[in-house]
Image: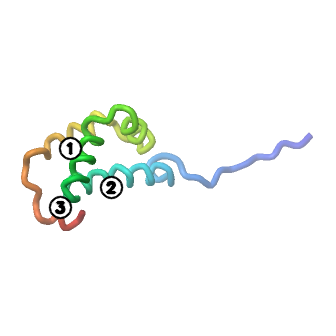
């Protein structure tokens, strides 16, 4: 009986394709919150600050702590965004 050794070509950690994908999902939500149309801003804010079902799973898949993300985003609330942030979005 022979045993085959299989090596995965999928990366692990911060550069794994799945991690990068989930970080892009979070980045898109933040982009919508910062500079999307008003309706999308409200939906993104609801998702980023009040969703306790899906966002925790997304953050976990992205290798991020939801409490840390929300804390940092909370500091941005009510502060004017620099023009370069809006241009980058």
Residue 31's image quarter? bottom left
| Residue 32 horizontal/vertical position (percent) | 26, 55
Q: Is residue 82 above or below residue 73?
A: below
Q: Nearer the viewer, mark 2 or mark 1?
A: 2
Direction from residue 40 to residue 74 in the image, left or right: left
| Residue 77 horizontal/vertical position (percent) | 13, 44
Residue named by callout 2 = 28
Identity of the residue furthest to the right in this view: 1
Q: Which sits earlier in the primary sequence, circle 1 or circle 3?
A: 1
Q: CA distance from mark 1 to mark 3?
A: 14 Å
- Dot 1 falls on a residue whose secondary structure is helix
What residue do we see at 34% from left, 36% from top? 65
What residue do we see at 92% from left, 40% from top? 1
Direction from residue 36 to residue 82 in the image, left or right: left
- Dot 3 falls on a residue whose secondary structure is helix
Q: Which sits earlier in the primary sequence, circle 2 or circle 3?
A: 2
Q: Is residue 33 above or below residue 52?
A: below
Query: Label 1 near label 2: C-beta < 8 Å?
Result: no
Identity of the residue furthest to the front in this view: 39
Residue named by callout 1 = 73
Rendered image: mark on residue 13: none
- Dot 2 falls on a residue whose secondary structure is helix
Residue named by callout 3 = 85
Quadrant including the C terminus: bottom left
Q: Which sits earlier in the primary sequence, circle 2 or circle 1?
A: 2
| Residue 64 horizontal/vertical position (percent) | 36, 41
| Residue 13 horizontal/vertical position (percent) | 48, 46
Query: Label 3 near label 1: C-beta < 8 Å?
Result: no
The foreground one among 13 and 50 is 50
């Amino acid at each position: 009986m022979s045993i085959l050794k299989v090596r995965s070509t999928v990366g692990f950690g911060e550069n794994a394709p799945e991690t990068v994908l989930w970080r892009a999902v979070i980045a898109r939500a933040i982009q919508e919150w910062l500079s999307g149309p008003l309706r999308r801003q409200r939906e993104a804010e609801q998702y980023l600050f009040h969703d306790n079902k899906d966002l925790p799973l997304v953050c976990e898949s992205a290798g991020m702590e939801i409490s840390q993300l929300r804390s940092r985003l909370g500091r941005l609330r009510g502060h004017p965004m620099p023009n370069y942030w809006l241009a980058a979005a």
